[in-house]
Image (cartoon, grey):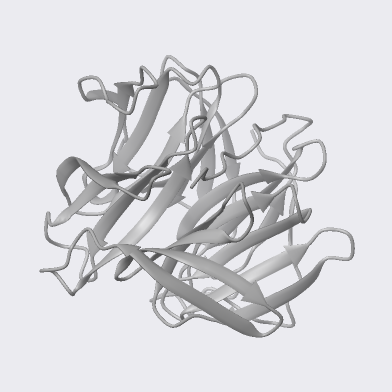
Amino acid sequence: MAADYHIVERGGTRDELGEGLFWSVREQALYWTDILSKRLHRLTLADMSVTSWDMPEMTGWVIEREQGGMIAGMQTGFHTLDLDGDTVRTEAIANPHPDLPDNRMNDAKADRAGRIWAGSMPLTADKPTGGLFRLDPDHSMHVMESGYTVANGPTFSADGETFYHTDTPHGFIYRFAFPGDGTLGARETFVRFEDGWGRPDGMTTDAEGGIWVAHWGGNCISRFTPDGKRERVIELPASQITNICFAGPDLDRMFVTSAAEGKHDEPLSGSLFEVETGGVQGLAPGLFKG
């Protein structure tokens, strides 16, 4: 099923690797990163203006702190992040890979208890040196899973009882029982991508429990039902689709990032898209409580 989309105008700017979408209810603004260009962007929905900052390292994502400011997933791990005009201030919290300087953080979400669940990957995206980590409000870090090549796309079910995660190159979306105490149940396969679908990248969940997945190399996003059925496809004019986020006061606007890396012959690769979802609403984003 097709749907309308449009390109968010940014003066012709494209992202080498757009990622890490986060809707700020506090600011009524959408944040996302360009990992390879070491940039952070903010789209203010009131006037659709974009503000950008240079980051000191490759940054995969930002998540707001309940107390103000943000947490950023950077090449060297978890950092606090404060933006003051043009000034960017960061402070290291924890590095999941102190002995692997060629690894970086990739994608993350905060749960209802205010913990961050974040994946990592090697810069070359070809070795199983990534993992899944949990950052607690007391700033302690915990290794939850290892052996990922490109840990990606965490999201939670609408009822908060299931955690979804991917290892992009292998084409699997996994699910875990999520009891809410900081542990995970056994890893199960939720969806195995078919030939021609590309690979699963970023994900988000709507208020009805649908799991929306960005297709890297697949020119689309898809909605899967909680039982794993692919019931909706929205085609987009870029092959490397990376992340999805609901935004707006009613969480009924959807934004999608993409990557121009290696695809500069595609005129719209690296664009930020707004997609018409037909009234489907998302869930409020989790905030970090530390």
Question: Quick check: 110 above or below 9?
Answer: above
Quarter of the view holding residue 283: top right
Q: Residue at x 26, y 54 (%)?
A: 150
Q: Residue at x 75, y 38 (%)?
A: 251
Judging depth in this view, the residue of 25 and 222 nearest the camera is: 25
Question: Quick check: 157 above or below 255?
Answer: above
Quarter of the view holding residue 104: bottom left
Judging depth in this view, the residue of 166 and 278 nearest the camera is: 166
Residue sitting at the far front: 138
Where does the image place residue 143, in percent across and percent down from the top left?
A: 20, 44
Left or right: 4, with 58 as reference point: right
Count of all numbered marks drawn on residues in the image = 0
Residue 258 visible within the image? yes
Q: Residue at x 79, y 53 (%)?
A: 28
Left or right: 221, with 91 as reference point: right
Judging depth in this view, the residue of 116 and 168 nearest the camera is: 116
Where does the image place residue 53, in percent across and percent down from the top left?
A: 60, 80
Residue 239 visible within the image? no
Quarter of the view holding residue 9: bottom right
Where does the image place residue 74, in percent across and percent down from the top left?
A: 38, 68
Left or right: 37, with 169 as reference point: right
Q: Residue at x 68, y 77 (%)?
A: 84
Judging depth in this view, the residue of 164 and 12 nearest the camera is: 164
